[in-house]
Structures are given as structure tokens and as C-alpha cells.
Amino acid sequence: MQNSIKMTLGETVQIHGVTLKKAKFGVYLRNLQLEKEFSKVLQRIVGTMQNIKDGDYSRYAVLLADLLDELVRALSDITDSGEAQLKELSFEQLCDVWSEYQKLNDLTAFFESRPVHENGSVENKENWVQRWIAVGLSIGLTKDAMLNDYYLDELITIVDMHNAKHSDVKDVDAEDF
């Protein structure tokens, strides 16, 4: 089980009065799309701020306010934090919350540990969710349980334990009969 990543079950982080929780597998999958939308809004805000010249904020004030509201809504959806609480934070603090959420739910180790096949090719990243569901089903977990009851690093440990338990089975050749 040396390939298992560090377990972080139920881990929480507090930043600027906002409590962030480690996302369970299904929530993590939902948030992948929300994170793309959040990043787009963040890029629009940065772009708008770069366009402000000579202190002429009046032209961009409404746009920035709308973009910040959009950013707060997206961050609220991703982190399950209240919009009212997030609206009290500065732009920099919102970015801190986003950064901590990303650290808490970082799956770099998982995606970097893709299986290498005998021919040296690395398993592709397409359909990785479906493969994980198939693995879970093969060891007796339901899809609903996998998505709603487990964290991804917890699933990795469960699969490692299952494989360790079943790896003691000796392969039987036809000659053994």
C-alpha cells in the first residue's frame, strides 16, 4: 500500500472566517465544472482591472461590482459557504479562500500516479471517472456510495486494501489440476 496517498478524511480549514471542507468524490466531480466557471470570472476581473487607466473607475465600477457578485456566487457554490459571508471579504481575501480550497482538494498526486502499462504508455485521463466507478462496483461499492459517502483518497485506500487482501490468492495453472 505504498502507493496510497495521504488520507485527509473530513479535513477542514478555516480562513477569513470561512470554513472549507474536503470535498467528497461526487462533490469534487461537480466542482470541476464550477471551478472552470470561477476561473473565467476571475480572469475577467483581472482583465477589467488592467483596463482601468488614469483612475477612471466610474466606467468600470458597475462591471467590477457585477463580476465580484458573480465571483462570490461561484465561490459560494464551490465551497458551500454562504454568499453573505463571502460578500464581506475583500477581493484578496476571496482569492485566499479560493487558494485554500484548491490546496485542501488537491488531487495532483492522484493524477500524477496514473498506471504505466508494460509498453511504457501511461493510462489516459479520459473516462477516469467511469473507470473508478467500475472498480468500485467490482469490489461491492454502489455508485451512489462512491459519489456521496467517500473522499477520493479514501477510495484509493479501500481499493489498495481490497487488492492486498486478494493478492494472496495463488494463480492456478492447468498443470495444477
Image: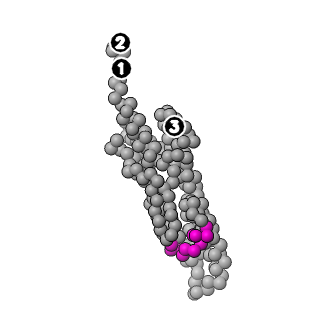
Element at badge 3? loop
Separation of marks 1 and 2 at Cα, in angstroms: 8 Å
Q: Are marks 1 and 2 in contact (CB under 8 Å)?
A: yes
Decide if residue 105 is on the left or right side of residue 76.
left
Residue 54 in the image: x percent, y percent? 57, 87
Instruction: Tell me if 86 is positioned left or right of 119 in this view.
Output: right
Q: Amino acid at mark 1?
A: Val
Query: Callout 1: 10 Å neighbours few (<14), some, many (20+)?
Result: few
The numbered mark, 3 or 1, whose residue comes first in the sequence reads 3
Q: Which residue is mark 3?
A: 141
Measure the alpha-carbon separation of dots 3 and 1: 28 Å
Q: Secondary structure at mark 1?
A: loop
Q: Which residue lies under the disc numbered 2?
A: 177
Alpha-carbon distance for marks 3 and 2?
A: 34 Å
> In which quarter of the view is residue 35 placed?
bottom right
Q: Is residue 29 above or below residue 81?
A: above
Q: Identify the residue under disc 1.
A: 172
